[in-house]
């Protein structure tokens, strides 16, 4: 195992931990920004360090298409290629293909899809996904899983869960660098507690360095989503990190952390920035609105970030959707907000004031109590 996970403090099920990875020691709860082609759109790696970012995500699928994982390996791995000295995580690629390419088809062998480059049929097997991720060299790599939307019902959910369990053994067998890269398994099983339970037990038996909860944030209602997270965290080992995939609304991070989850990733903070939306303690601030045109305040007067120290809402209103600098500055602020939220969760759990923190957070987001 190439990680150490030390729980430093708890409040009921919530944990504040230190996760030591080959390239960096991270504090949890932890939000991980998503990069696709080896970059977080609009931010330099210096800026990511400046805002306290500890680990970022890369996508096997995107990196394999361009520039290719063999080239990344030849050039010394993704850390060196993108000049990022802290931790990296890569997702296995299947989820991206299924969600991006409607032509993807899943068989026992792997995920088949048409190459967006030349239209040729391609096959991503568990072995190939791990081989590519070994080439990229991230601190954490993800197993190839069979993901189905949580809004689907019937035998397909069960088939995907059992296939995910069969594929984990192929991933483990294919993993060539367990001493420097941590392979996480992914719990599937839709909204069915029996299937989730079988998957949790099956993965825990494999004694992996960490576990992810997948197949969520796909349109199911919040109650079902939170119930699945609560069930999975209860069944996963206390001494291993738990990662809820694709989750990144501030409210979901706070709730999932209360339920015992540790890690999150989502494109939301950067994607919404490109549409002119800033994250603030009250929820969101839409910079495109005409009232912003003359507003001389920063995005958030309580935010210590570079953008809030230097720019007015009026200026950002003027840039947003017209100049790349607009989305860059909003992405900088939004990721700063997520990093601050992660730190606040960590510190409040450590200092025994997690309930007060959660109450304060909810009061800001829902002032009318709804
Ligand atoms: N990203 C968001 N959800 C998932 C999931 O269920 N599996 C994988 N591999 N990636 C995800
Ligand atoms: Zn700010």
Image (cartoon, helix red, strand yellow):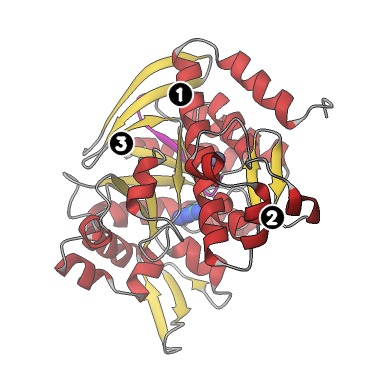
Q: Which stretch is magenta?
A: 239-247
User: Label 3 near label 2: C-beta < 8 Å?
Assistant: no
Prevailing secondary structure of the magenta residues: loop
* Residue at screen point 77% across, 30% down: 366
| Between discs 1 and 2, the one toward the N terminus | 2
Q: Secondary structure at mark 2?
A: loop
Is residue 240 within the magenta segment? Answer: yes
Can you say whether 29 is above or below 145 in the image? above
The numbered mark, 1 or 3, whose residue comes first in the sequence reads 3
Q: Which residue is mark 1?
A: 346
Q: Which residue is mark 3?
A: 207
Q: Position of residue 208 (x, y in %)?
A: 31, 39
Residue 259, image quadrant? top right
**Residue picked out by circle 2:** 153
> In whole angstroms, how far apart are the C-alphas of marks 1 and 3?
26 Å
How many numbered discs sit on the rendered protein?
A: 3
Q: Is residue 216 above or below residue 230?
A: below
What is the quadrant of the C terminus in the image?
top right
């Amino acid at each position: 195992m190439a990680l150490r996970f030390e729980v430093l403090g708890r409040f009921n099920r919530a944990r504040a931990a230190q996760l030591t990875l080959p390239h960096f020691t991270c504090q949890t709860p932890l939000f991980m920004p998503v990069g696709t082609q080896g970059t977080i759109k609009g931010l330099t790696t210096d800026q990511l360090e400046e805002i306290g970012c500890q680990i970022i995500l890369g996508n096997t699928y995107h990196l394999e298409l361009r520039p290719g994982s063999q080239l990344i390996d030849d050039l010394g791995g993704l850390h060196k290629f993108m000049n990022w000295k802290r931790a990296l995580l890569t997702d296995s690629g299947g989820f991206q293909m299924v969600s991006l390419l409607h032509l993807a088809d899943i068989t026992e062998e792997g995920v088949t899809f048409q190459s967006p480059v030349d239209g040729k049929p391609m096959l991503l097997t568990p072995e190939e996904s791990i081989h590519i991720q070994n080439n990229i060299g991230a601190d954490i790599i993800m197993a190839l899983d069979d993901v189905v939307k949580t809004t689907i019902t019937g035998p397909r959910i069960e088939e995907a869960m059992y296939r995910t369990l069969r594929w984990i053994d192929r991933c483990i067998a294919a993993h060539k660098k367990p001493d420097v890269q941590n392979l996480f398994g992914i719990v599937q099983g839709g909204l069915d507690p029996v299937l989730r339970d079988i998957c949790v037990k099956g993965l825990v038996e494999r004694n992996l360095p960490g576990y992810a909860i997948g197949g969520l944030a796909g349109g199911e209602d919040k109650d079902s989503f939170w119930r699945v997270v609560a069930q999975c965290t209860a069944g996963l080992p206390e001494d291993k990190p738990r990662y809820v995939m694709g989750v990144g609304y501030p409210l979901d991070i706070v709730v999932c952390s209360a339920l015992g989850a540790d890690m999150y990733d989502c494109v939301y903070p950067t994607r919404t920035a490109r549409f002119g939306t800033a994250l603030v303690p009250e929820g969101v601030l839409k910079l495109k609105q005409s009232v912003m045109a003359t507003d001389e305040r920063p995005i958030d007067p309580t935010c210590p970030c570079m953008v809030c120290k230097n720019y007015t809402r009026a200026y950002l209103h003027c840039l947003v959707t017209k100049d790349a600098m607009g989305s860059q500055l909003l992405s900088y602020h939004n990721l700063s907000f997520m990093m601050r939220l992660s730190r606040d969760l960590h510190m409040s759990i450590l200092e025994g004031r997690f309930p007060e923190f959660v109450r304060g957070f909810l009061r800001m987001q829902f002032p009318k109590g709804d």
